[in-house]
Image (cartoon, helix red, strand yellow):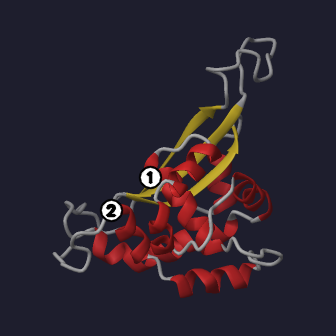
Amino acid sequence: MSKSTTFFGQPIFSQMINLLDKNKVNARASSHKSDHYCKRFSTFQHLISMIYGVTSGCNSLRELCGGIVSYGDKISHWKFDYSLKRSTISDANKRRDCIVFEHIYDDLVTEFLPSLADSQKQLVIDKKVYAIDSTTIALFQPIFECVGRNSHNGKRKGGIKSHQKLDMQVGILVKVYHSNAREHDSLFIKKKKV
């Protein structure tokens, strides 16, 4: 990517947020009707709070809200005009469909894909190459030993499986899908028409 002085002196999180086009996110939100029955916490604010949670390594809603509140007056810079509560994020996670965030991610990949590959070594292949991988995330098994169904063969499948499709030329994920831990990768290929 070419060197730019646009983001000079700004924290990395602010640089990431400034790359998001609020009008495009709001257009996706209106097409999916994800802001219906929401008074204050918009899809754009939900996206910003989830990006903050991922980049700062938050493990709970308490950490997420505490981290956002700890910035004090800088919250207005993040497009928040009020103090975020755990119940607000929890309700939004329940009510707002995740498909809107998938389409926002697809829009970002489409927009920034041409500028991501110039600093990496290109594959010398005429066709587009994708890698498909998955990982099983055991839910609470390290903490609670009783979680998950014990089958007759002793294997436990308490968790979710994260399936990813990786663009090998650029080196970024272009599709992510979550399913039951028992689901095989071939079903991801059939469902998502990878």
Give whichever of 102, 55 is nearer the camera.
55
The location of residue 145, given as percent across then percent down, is 71, 15
Q: Residue furthest left?
A: 3
Among the two numbered marks 2 and 1 on one chain, the one whose residue lies closer to the N terminus: 2
Position of residue 148 measured from the top left corner of the image (x, y, whole percent): 76, 24
Q: What element carries label 2?
A: helix
Q: What residue type is labelled 2?
A: Ile
Q: Nearer the viewer, residue 188 or 69?
A: 69
Residue depicted at 65% across the width and 72% down the height: 43
Image mark count: 2
Q: Name above or below for residue 170 compared with residue 20.
A: above
Q: Which corner quadrant holds the N terminus?
A: bottom left
In this picture, residue 9 sits left or right of residue 189: left
Circle 2 residues within 10 Å: few <14, some 14–19, many ≥20: few
Numbered label attached to residue 34: none
Task: Name the image quarter holding the C terminus.
Answer: bottom right
Name above or below for residue 62 compared with residue 175.
above
**Kind of residue indicated by mark 1:** Thr
| 70 versus 150 height, above or below | below
In the displayed orientation, state which residue is furthest to the front. Answer: 73
For marks 2 and 1, give the CA distance: 10 Å
Image position of 3 (left or right of 165): left
Residue sitting at x 45%, y 49%: 56
Q: Where residue 163 sits: x, y (%)?
A: 58, 48
Q: What residue do we see at 57% from left, 72% from top?
A: 80
Tag 2–tag 1 contact (CB < 8 Å): yes
Kindly identify which residue carries mark 2.
12
Q: In this view, does 62 lie to the left or right of 17?
A: right
Q: Residue 55 carries which label?
A: 1
